[in-house]
Amino acid sequence: MTKKPIIWTISGSDCSGGAGIAADIKTGHGLGVEVCQLISANTVQNSQQLLSVNSVSIDILQQQAALLMTDKPPSVIKIGLVANVAQVKWLVQLLEQLKQKMPTLISVYDPVGQATVGGSFNSLTLAQLRPLLQDVDVITPNLLEAQSLAQLAEISDAERLAKKIYDDFAIHSIIVKGGHSEIALDSSDYCYHQLNQLPGKQDNQDKTQAAISYQLTSKRIASHYSHGGGCSFATALSAFLAHGYLVRDAFTLAKAFINQGFNASEPVSKLYGHQYYGAFEQQGWPYQAAFFPQAVDEVSKKYQTLPAFNSLNLAGKKLGLYPVIDSLYWLKRLLPLGLEIIQLRIKNLALADVEQVIIEAVFLAKSYDTRLFINDYWQLAIKHGAYGVHIGQEDLQAADLFKIQQAGLRLGISTHGCYEFLLAQQLQPSYLAIGAVFPTTTKDMTGQIQGLNNLTQVLALRPNNNITQIPVVAIGGINLVRAAQVVATGVESIAVVTAITEAKSSYNISPEQVVEKLQKIIG
Ligand SMILES: Cc1ncc(COP(=O)(O)OP(=O)(O)O)c(N)n1
Ligand SMILES: Cc1ncsc1CCOP(=O)(O)O
Ligand SMILES: [Mg+2]
């Protein structure tokens, strides 16, 4: 066991045990965070009705916050039921004070207003809530709540509502939950997210982009064990953020957590004719691919009709060691070592010079029967008949994948977490890369270090079917010391730069010797 991140939940107690604090504790417990609870109100409810909401005094809440700050400061605060105007004012002050002390603190607000069983948790107007809305970082309304926050006269879709809420309150991430309506076949949640604006999160490698928006969709699971599902979603999101995930990955994991819970309770819900309103079933960390949603963004919409890319034709062999080099010098030195794959990654060379290098590299790699991937320069790769192209997330917007596919080139795509992995997997490339597994000096990967756990998690996201399984390459900070741990995850290939190019200074052996040792480790 390692020390767990701490989240605070400031929410109501539901005496029937389904929603509020009870849901938050059960969720946090299963997701490896400590949950401190500040109860905003003691409610009287069961699965049929809400009888009363009995607010807790500001004095008690303030004493709890002050005492907890001395030994359990939070990395994320989740806010649920807010009972009255005094609590709004107290929360605004609290968040401002805590953010001054802890600039990386993230606040998540789940704006519970109406009880599913009927009745209101508070009578706050939008004007009264405004100061709190302007202070929180992430908000998770359902469609009805979003409609009331956005104050649009006509019924609008999630995208329009989220943008209006952003315009009005400048909340960095707005997740509008599509919910589990009885008629819809799918459950779609939508996120509008301003990049690089969450405290402590650098999630924008593509500096030209200010915001991203995307949708996570899953098949609706018929379970009436949904009491506390909304609270559990917001707390799961908070827990994943507290573990350091970016919003898109935390959102994806939280959605998988909800699907997993509904899936577990579906049989018992059916047994009771989907009539009994049961407590949402928290099941712990989600691993199974089946629970993960489909991600939809502009790129995935554009490439809906794109055929699969040619495979690497490995004929049962392992992809193995994947050196990433920047010159013909290294290519000539490494090609004789019996590699299945190699990448030319040229940075800082004039375009005219790059073309000449690519022409020569393609010729050399063909003579050794080694799969040569060209990084970034996809047009030149097509023009000169390279084996494949490797493109990053930023290039996905600009590159023409139809042209690469039609030219018969193989495609490798960089990903940095489960959200991008799911999106890239839908494009059916020849391989998927995931990184940086460890910190690296070769490239600025701030906020995108995956670790071995995330690597293991994304490997499990491939369909459990050998015919369609796309090989995965791990990259970033992998060296002679770390290679064995990476290989143990089951990844098909490891890509390295400095482990080879800086062999002499790191290990006092030649690059050729490092290649041999790494090949042995990979097996
Ligand atoms: C095998 C492999 N994986 C990831 C990368 C990174 O590619 P990209 O995201 O295009 O970033 P740059 O390499 O262009 O900095 C890679 N090159 N190879
Ligand atoms: C290009 C790239 N993309 C993700 S990490 C990385 C650098 C890998 O270099 P090294 O093997 O020296 O850590
Ligand atoms: Mg690139």
Image (cartoon, rainbow, N blue to C red):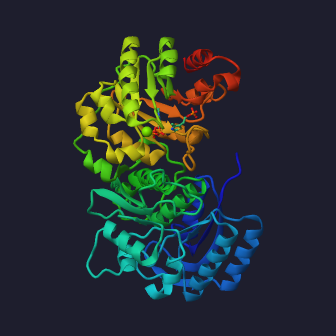
- Residue 167 drawn at (x, y percent): 40, 75
- Residue 376 drawn at (x, y percent): 39, 37
Judge left or right: residue 410 versus residue 72: left
Image vertical order of residue 389 relative to residue 61, above or below: above
**Whether residue 79 can be seen here:** yes
- Residue 513 drawn at (x, y percent): 62, 15
Q: Point out the image quarter for the C terminus.
A: top right
Residue 143: name its quadrant: bottom left
**Figure label count:** 0
Q: Nearer the viewer, residue 301 or 240?
A: 301
Image vertical order of residue 334 relative to residue 433, above or below: above
Q: Nearer the viewer, residue 437 or 234?
A: 437
- Residue 103 drawn at (x, y percent): 64, 66
Q: Point out the image quarter for the N terminus.
A: top right
- Residue at the (31%, 64%) spot, across then down: 181
- Residue at the (67%, 53%) spot, across then down: 4
- Residue at the (34%, 48%) spot, across then down: 397
Residue 166: name its quadrant: bottom left
Ligand 3: which quarter? top left
